[in-house]
Amino acid sequence: MIDQERPGQAEALLHVDGPGSMDLCRPVWAAETTVLRRVEPGDWEAVLALESSSSYQRAWERVTAPRSPDNCREWMKQEAAKDPLDDNFFLAITDRQHGGMVGCVNTTQADPVAGRFYLGMAVAPEHQRKGYAWEAGLLVLGYMFGERRYQKAQAYVHDFNKTSQEGMLAFGATLEGRLRRHDYFGGRYHDNLIFGLTAQEFFAAHGTPRAARQPAPRSESFIGSPASPRSTAQA
């Protein structure tokens, strides 16, 4: 028996892929001003400086005792040695012109069966509001949706992190829930907000590799927070 096309299947595929031929020569890991690469052992100083910020630690997970240089070097070695086929990755956000590391982006809890993963990123204060996080987010989401066939991205954002909330909404995500009094920072409990973004919503908002991307929102300078690089390294 010949398999019959399910009702609405053609429309759904068109909604995801869009019309026209796909440009397979388009770079997957490079945008106008941003290039993503695997972190290297030599990145430990930039990562340690970024992680030393209390605001950064609160956005990722929680404030901890300072990490030692030796510990950070060892962590970078472990991350640099990871299998590139692992969908839980930790990448350096670099400037395309000068090649310097300006931040980091990661995916965690990637579940290929359910087709979902968590997204997080951070940009150093001196490099914020330049579009790096916006372009890095589009590149990672485009890769996970368009190359690895994941169907949903999720992110946890604390209630005080207004810039990350705006960033997730700009990507096209929806606020799906609120975990009340979920984390403790600065002497009080805070809610944790759950954002979700499906592949269909992402492609509808930003197009596929065959279409032009949306320009970065002017307010972009956020530090996203689904999970800490510390927990990623321990996984």
Image: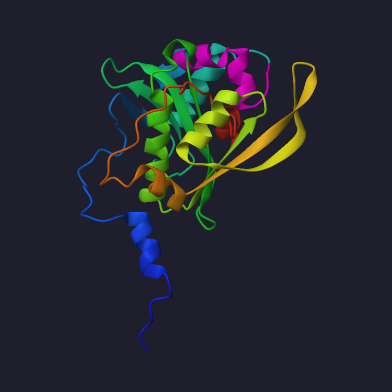
Could one spot residue 193 in this view of the protein?
A: yes
Residue 57 sits inside the magenta stretch: yes
Could one spot residue 224 in this view of the protein?
A: no
Q: Position of residue 40 (x, y in %)?
A: 39, 24
Front position in the image: 164 or 101: 164
Front position in the image: 164 or 76: 164
Residue at figure coordinates x 32%, y 37% from the top left: 213
Image: 174 above or below 39: below
In the image, 189: left or right of 96?
A: right
Q: Position of residue 33 (x, y in %)?
A: 30, 23
Image: 196 above or below 166: below
Q: Residue furthest bottom?
A: 1
In the image, 58: left or right of 92?
A: right
Front position in the image: 42 or 98: 98
Q: Give residue 58's quadrant in the image.
A: top right
Residue at figure coordinates x 39%, y 23% from the top left: 131
* First to last magenta residue range: 46-64
Q: Position of residue 151 (x, y in %)?
A: 47, 53
Residue at figure coordinates x 43%, y 46% from the top left: 202
Residue at figure coordinates x 35%, y 35% from the top left: 214
Tell me the quarter of the image containing the C terminus: top right
Q: Position of residue 142 (x, y in %)?
A: 38, 43
